[in-house]
Amino acid sequence: MVGERGLGPVLAQLAAARPALRFHLIGHSFGARVVSFSLRAVPDRARYVKSVTLLQGAFSHYAFADRLPHDKGTGGALRGLQRRVDGPVVACHSPYDSALKIFYPLASRMAGDSAGLLGFDERWGAIGHDGVQAVPGAPRLTLDTALREGLPATGCVSVDAGSVVRRGGAPSGAHSDICHEELARLVVDAGRMGR
C-alpha cells in the first residue's frame, strides 16, 4: 500500500512537475518492498525511474516473474514491472542474512502462505537471500564481477553481496550489514551516475 498508493503517485507527480528529474530508488529490507511496489503506479511508457537497487529485500524472490515455477498460470506480484525502469533492477542478496534465510519463509508459513516443510519451501524465499528467481535472462553476478564489469543496462540482475554483507549476530545475521563502500559504488553504477 505504501509503495503503490504512497510513493508511486508522489513520483508520478514529481515527474509531471519536473520532467527532467531522474529517480534512483534504493530500499533496504521492507524499504526494498516499498520502492519495488511503487512501480505499480508508474505508467507503462514512463521513463523517469532510472534504477532500482534492493538491499536485502524482504519480499518474494519470484516477485518479478511472469510465471511462477510451481504455478505456471500465475505470475509474481510485480510481474514484468522491471520494464517500467529505464535501467537495471539490482537485487543484492547474501547467504549470511539469517532474517531472510530462516525467518522470512517461517513467517510466510505462519501466515498460511506455505505448505512446505517447516516453512522452508523454496516458493517463499526472499529476494534478499537468493536474488531474483524465475526471470529469464536475469544475470547472477558476484559483487566483485558487478563492480569490475558493470551491470546490465536494463532488466533484473542479482548480485551476491555476501563478500561484504556477512557480519551480524543472532537472530538476523547480516541482514543490516549494508553500510559498505562497495554497495554505494553499486548504487552509483546502477544509476549510471557520473557518466
Image (cartoon, grey):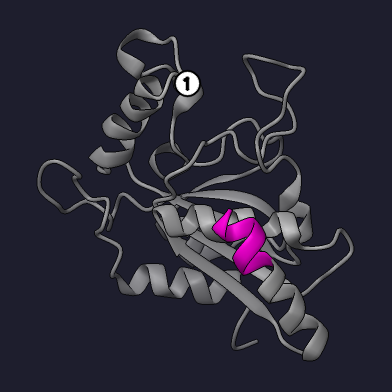
Residue 91 percent coordinates (x, y): 51, 52
Which residue appears at 27% of the width and 43% of the height?
A: 97
Residue 19 makes an appearance in the image: no
Q: Residues within 10 Å of mark 1 (few under 14, many from 20)?
A: some
Closest to the observer, 15 or 1: 1
Which residue ends up furthest to the right in the rendered image?
Answer: 45
Residue 48 percent coordinates (x, y): 76, 75
Residue 37 percent coordinates (x, y): 62, 53
Which residue appears at 75% of the width and 79% of the height?
A: 13
Residue 138 included in the magenta stretch of the image: no
Q: Which region shows up in magenta?
A: 1-8
Which residue ends up furthest to the left in the rendered image?
Answer: 169
Closest to the observer, 30 or 133: 30
Q: Which residue is mark 1?
A: 113
**Magenta stretch, overall SS:** helix
Q: How many marks?
A: 1
Closest to the observer, 148 or 43: 43
Residue 5 included in the magenta stretch of the image: yes
Which residue appears at 14% of the width and 52% of the height?
A: 168
Residue 73 percent coordinates (x, y): 77, 18
The quarter of the displayed image where residue 107 is located: top left
Q: Is residue 182 left or right of residue 45?
A: left
The amino acid marked with disc number 1 is Asp
